[in-house]
Image: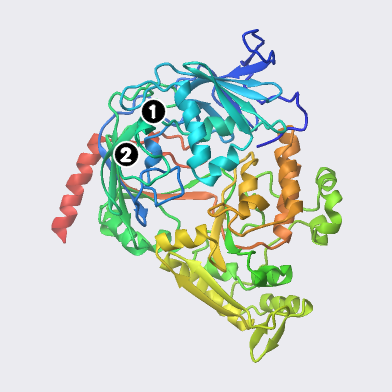
């Protein structure tokens, strides 16, 4: 969330919070003190909570877990733009506060025990736990926090500079108390951004090291795990820190139970699945409908050794789609962008390739109360009216709905609609080729991807585009080249996803803001550069409360949707996971996503699994 319109507005916190008017605060500004922060209603957990609902406080420690990742790595610093950082590094670092998987829009104290937020949002004070330690036993102090802020702003990824642009400075009040001063209009998300995103870096550790360079030497962290061993591009193993300082914190009780966590890296998604069925790793989140429906068939699955689960979630759906690179002139015409959406036959794909496991998003905030529906409300119109002459007229009518076919693969209506849209906008067919009315050249489009499995989804779209006279092709590159080309915006069209929370705010600048689109490596992959959208983002960030936020988000949603900046693909409100039956876990599933950090190895199950797998091998 973001800037407030009224300087007196305060963060939404638990009723147990208290006002601190101590004269020790030089600013003499009232503050609200709490064990957590929330942007969308009261905190789920009170100040005296003992553990998360989905964590078992009696979970045993021990055992080894193997996970997997696609691609490779050559860097152990996840906070810089250079190189490919290894999966799982977040296990080794900590932040001042952290978010559980069952309380979206909230965060609770981790390195910081409590936080004091000025009622005018001009500053926030984090009261740190004196017992917080780095892995070498040195305490985490205010000096380390200040060093962390300065370092990531100056040498970290552009995301940090962007997010912390309005963090004026950090001030040391004492060794375990640090005050962040905020500039610009009041911004109720800034305390949470500082609390949740700022990694704790050791000032002493970097006295003899350069932060901005890639490294394969582990960086000193303070998290529940540390790097044990690795081989670049092949594997990395993390070991549980036996004397981890934060093990008994309520936010951690019953979590971080495995002795080691290893990530093996694969180059091919088909090999990745076969490796799982062969027992090469233990847990898998499945994002392929075909693989979920047909790919797990194996003796181990039939014997009950592999468990498949589809777990519903309550999170905002990711808007995933084919994103146009608007920096290229051929995609500046909104009529072309709209016409191309009719070439993506979701209904046929869902029936024939996705096994009816997906839905198609109509909104950038699908599966939430923030998705635009029907006609704009009075509150939405009040936001949109000042820009009426700069917006597509349809923004002021019914909410956007993606095109629908009859699912047979023979429905001609969508492509006929596309042809009419193009013809009305001056696009003509010459020699079977669609001609750009501005350049007089045939239109060509290349789809950039890194996973060969994507071809089965993109192939039917390319076939339909060719029916429109477009010379459409696909190019599959390795993950390193794909990352580099995206970082430098060297593509026509690619697939991108935009994950939202229940409290959208400052990150919207990174997704759609004009300034972000001009920075290499930003999340504004499409290069959106629109002053009206910039204004709508600032209005959203300025929402004084959650009730005002919802129409602000819906207004932005309407404008994004009716400008056809991408071709919506599909989403699922279900997490599909598969795992070898060696785990114990709570009966409660967190609402946002499965959290394997709260699982544990069941010794008896593991013993039975080993014996059963041995029997299966003998049967072969």
Q: Is residue 250 above or below residue 616?
A: above
Q: Quadrant of residue 40?
A: top right
The answer to whether residue 320 shows anywhere in this view is yes
Can you give x and y, in whole percent of width and height, for residue 157 in the image? 50, 45
Which residue is labeled 2 in the image?
A: 218
Q: Between residues 530 and 555, which one lies in front from this camera angle?
A: 530
Question: Which disc is residue 204 wearing?
Answer: none
Q: Is residue 410 above or below residue 386?
A: below
Label 2 Cα crowd, 10 Å radius (few <14 / some 14-19 / many 20+): some
Identity of the residue drawn at 15% across and 59% down: 619
Mark 2 or mark 1: name the one nearer the start of the chain.
1
Q: Is residue 581 above or below residue 289?
A: above
Can you give x and y, in whole percent of width and height, for residue 579 in the image? 34, 48
Label 1 sits on a secondary structure element that is loop
Which residue is labeled 1 in the image?
A: 56
Can you give x and y, in whole percent of width and height, for residue 467 in the image? 61, 83
Identity of the residue drawn at 67% across and 10% down: 21
Left or right of 579, for residue 394? right
Q: Nearer the viewer, mark 2 or mark 1?
A: 2
Can you give x and y, in whole percent of width and height, for residue 350 in the image? 54, 65
């Amino acid at each position: 969330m973001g800037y407030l319109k009224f300087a007196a507005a305060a963060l939404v916190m638990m009723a147990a919070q208290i006002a601190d008017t101590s004269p020790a605060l030089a600013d003499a500004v009232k503050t609200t003190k709490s064990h957590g922060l929330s942007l969308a209603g009261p905190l789920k957990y009170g100040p005296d909570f003992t553990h998360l609902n989905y964590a078992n406080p009696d979970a045993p420690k021990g055992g080894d877990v193997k996970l997997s990742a696609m691609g490779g790595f050559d860097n152990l610093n996840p906070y810089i733009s250079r190189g490919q950082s290894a999966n799982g590094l977040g296990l080794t670092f900590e932040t001042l506060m952290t978010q559980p998987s069952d309380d979206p829009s909230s965060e609770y104290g981790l390195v910081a025990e409590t936080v004091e937020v000025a009622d005018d949002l001009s500053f926030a004070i984090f009261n740190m736990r004196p017992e917080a330690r780095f892995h070498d036993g040195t305490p985490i102090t205010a000096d380390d926090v200040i060093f962390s802020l300065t370092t990531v702003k100056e040498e970290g990824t552009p995301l940090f500079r962007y997010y912390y642009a309005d963090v004026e400075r950090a001030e040391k009040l004492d060794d375990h108390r640090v005050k962040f001063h905020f500039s610009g209009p009041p911004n109720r998300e800034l305390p949470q951004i500082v609390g949740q995103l700022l990694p704790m870096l050791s000032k002493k550790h970097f006295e003899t090291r350069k932060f901005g360079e890639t490294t394969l030497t582990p960086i000193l962290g303070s998290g529940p795990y540390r790097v044990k061993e690795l081989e670049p591009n092949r594997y990395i193993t993390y070991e549980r820190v036996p004397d981890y300082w934060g093990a008994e914190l309520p936010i951690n009780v019953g979590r971080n139970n495995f002795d080691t966590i290893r990530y093996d890296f694969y180059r091919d998604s088909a090999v990745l699945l076969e490796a799982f069925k062969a027992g090469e790793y233990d847990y898998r989140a499945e994002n392929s409908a075909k693989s979920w429906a047909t790919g797990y068939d194996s003796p181990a699955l039939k014997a009950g050794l592999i468990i498949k689960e589809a777990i519903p979630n309550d999170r905002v759906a990711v808007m995933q789609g084919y994103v146009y690179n608007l920096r290229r002139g051929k995609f500046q015409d909104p009529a072309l962008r709209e016409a191309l959406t009719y070439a993506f036959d979701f209904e046929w794909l869902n029936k024939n390739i996705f096994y009816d496991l997906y839905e198609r998003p109509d909104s950038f905030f699908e599966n939430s109360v923030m998705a635009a529906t029907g006609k704009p409300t009075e509150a939405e119109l009040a936001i949109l009216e000042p820009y009426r002459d700069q917006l597509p007229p349809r923004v002021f009518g019914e909410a956007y709905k993606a095109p629908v076919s009859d699912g047979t693969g023979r429905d001609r209506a969508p492509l006929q609609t596309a042809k009419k849209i193009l013809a009305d906008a001056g696009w003509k067919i010459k020699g079977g080729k669609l001609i750009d009315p501005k350049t007089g050249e045939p239109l060509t489009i290349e789809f950039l991807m890194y996973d060969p499995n994507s071809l089965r989804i993109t192939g039917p779209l390319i076939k339909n585009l060719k029916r429109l006279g477009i010379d459409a092709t696909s190019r599959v590159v390795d993950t390193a080249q794909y990352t580099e080309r995206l970082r430098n915006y060297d593509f026509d069209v690619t697939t991108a996803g935009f994950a939202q929370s229940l409290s959208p705010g400052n990150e919207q600048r990174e997704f759609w803001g004009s300034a972000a689109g001009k920075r290499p490596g930003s999340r504004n992959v499409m290069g959106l550069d629109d002053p009206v959208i910039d204004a709508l983002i600032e209005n959203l960030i300025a929402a004084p409360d959650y009730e005002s936020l919802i129409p602000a988000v819906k207004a932005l949603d309407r404008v994004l949707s009716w400008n056809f900046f991408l071709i919506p693909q599909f989403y699922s409100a279900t997490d599909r996971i598969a795992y070898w039956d060696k785990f114990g876990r709570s009966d409660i599933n967190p609402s946002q996503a499965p959290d394997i950090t709260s699982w544990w190895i069941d010794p008896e199950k593991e013993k039975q699994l080993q014996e059963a797998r041995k029997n299966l091998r003998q049967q072969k």
